[in-house]
Image: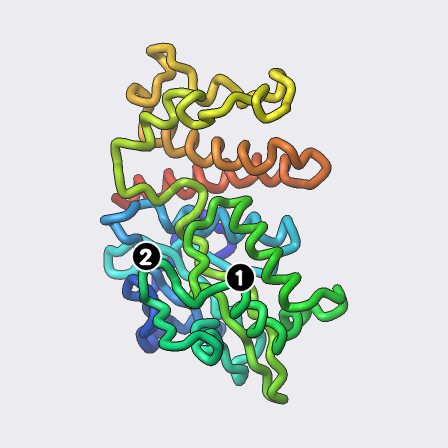
């Protein structure tokens, strides 16, 4: 697992138990070094590239100071997906979804209910008031609520759409202390998941469609408008005439441009170049395996 764009063959690993929660079937595997990793196959009905979004998001997180699950691309019996390392700092610690704690404050709370009723700011605040920073990050002097706020900013950065009450957790150590766990499950990010397969090419074919309001309306100089090469409507560059790799690269490039255009002082420009390179390698690997 030296290169993040290389696929791990899970048939060489030990199969463990199933993950009972989550929208899709997830399976645990034990690596040769005895670390535990969850395998998530791509939900083809949603997107064939969820594994790429997971990988790229996991590489962005540490660049912006967010503790997050380590991710690798993986294949199991013909299924393409990714593996996410267990975020527990110690095997003996307990990892519990936030939904369990939310249910103590929200009456008749159902984490599967549409709209996430009960997963409110007030209830989240009460849960986080009982917790401290992620294990290993105590010296940074931030409260659990501050760390969670950082996760939400990270969600905005990568356009994550799936921060429900079972997609963040608390880690309880052997002494009973409660910590907010590292962030995990970022597959529905970076514009990868699009249930309407015809929508994305049309969206990327026009700068106006992707940005309904112009840069001048947002108070920005015209020179800071998005690079037109990403949405050129000339025949040789239109989204409909682009190869799948070009459209895929464009989607990631667009999402990253949106998230970094006003953050010149942070190391996100380098991050943007790296993530485009990573996702291109991931896409090539997927195409070869299909």
Residue 255 against residue 14 in the figure, above or below: above
- The secondary structure type at the circle numbered 1 is loop
Using a 10 Å C-alpha cutoff, classify the residue at mark 2 as few (fewer than 14 neighbours), some (14 to 19) or many (20 or more).
Answer: many
Q: How many marks?
A: 2
For the residues marked 2 and 1, what is the alpha-carbon distance in whole angstroms?
23 Å
Residue at left offset 52%, top offset 53%: 58
- Mark on residue 183? 1
- The secondary structure type at the circle numbered 2 is strand
Q: Is residue 37 left or right of residue 156?
A: left
Is residue 13 something one can see in this rendering? Answer: no
Using a 10 Å C-alpha cutoff, classify the residue at mark 1 as few (fewer than 14 neighbours), some (14 to 19) or many (20 or more).
Answer: many
- Give the percent coordinates (x, y) of residue 15: 32, 74
- Give the percent coordinates (x, y) of residue 46: 28, 48
Residue 66 against residue 280 in the figure, above or below: below
Residue at left offset 38%, top offset 40%: 283
Name the image quarter holding the C terminus.
top left
Residue at left offset 43%, top offset 27%: 210
- Depth order, front residue of 10/274: 274
Q: Is residue 110 left or right of residue 208?
A: left
Q: Is residue 275 left or right of residue 41?
A: right
- Give the percent coordinates (x, y) of residue 62: 61, 53
- Mark on residue 75? 2
**Which numbered disc flags the more N-terminal residue, 2 or 1?**
2
Kindly indicate whether the residue at mark 1 contacts the one at mark 2 (C-beta within 8 angstroms): no
Question: Dividing the picture into quarters, in which one does residue 23 lie?
Answer: bottom left
Question: Dividing the picture into quarters, in which one does residue 118 lie?
Answer: bottom left
Is residue 110 something one can see in this rendering? Answer: yes
């Amino acid at each position: 697992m030296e290169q993040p764009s290389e696929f791990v063959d899970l048939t060489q690993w030990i199969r463990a138990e199933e993950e009972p929660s989550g929208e899709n079937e997830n399976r645990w595997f034990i690596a040769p070094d005895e670390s535990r990793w969850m395998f998530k196959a791509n939900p083809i009905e949603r997107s064939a590239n969820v594994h790429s979004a997971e990988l790229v998001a996991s590489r962005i997180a540490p660049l912006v100071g967010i503790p997050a699950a380590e991710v690798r691309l993986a294949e199991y019996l013909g299924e393409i997906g990714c593996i996410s390392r267990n975020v527990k700092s110690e095997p003996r610690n307990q990892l519990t979804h936030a939904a369990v704690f939310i249910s103590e404050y929200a009456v008749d709370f159902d984490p599967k209910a549409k709209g996430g009723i009960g997963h409110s700011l007030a209830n989240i605040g009460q849960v986080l008031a009982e917790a401290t920073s992620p294990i290993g990050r105590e010296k940074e002097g931030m409260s659990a609520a501050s760390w969670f706020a950082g996760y939400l900013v990270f969600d905005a950065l990568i356009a994550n759409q799936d921060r429900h009450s079972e997609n963040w957790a608390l880690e309880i150590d052997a002494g009973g202390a409660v910590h907010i766990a590292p962030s995990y499950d970022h597959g529905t990010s970076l514009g990868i998941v699009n249930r309407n397969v015809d929508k994305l090419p049309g969206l990327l074919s026009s700068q106006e469609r992707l940005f309904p309001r112009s840069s001048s309306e947002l108070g920005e100089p015209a020179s800071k408008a998005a690079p037109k090469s990403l949405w050129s409507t000339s025949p040789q560059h239109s989204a409909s005439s682009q190869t799948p790799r070009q459209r895929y690269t464009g989607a990631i490039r667009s999402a990253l441009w949106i998230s970094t255009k006003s953050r010149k002082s942070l190391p996100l420009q380098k991050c943007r170049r790296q993530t485009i390179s990573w996702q291109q390698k991931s896409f090539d690997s997927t195409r070869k395996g299909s």
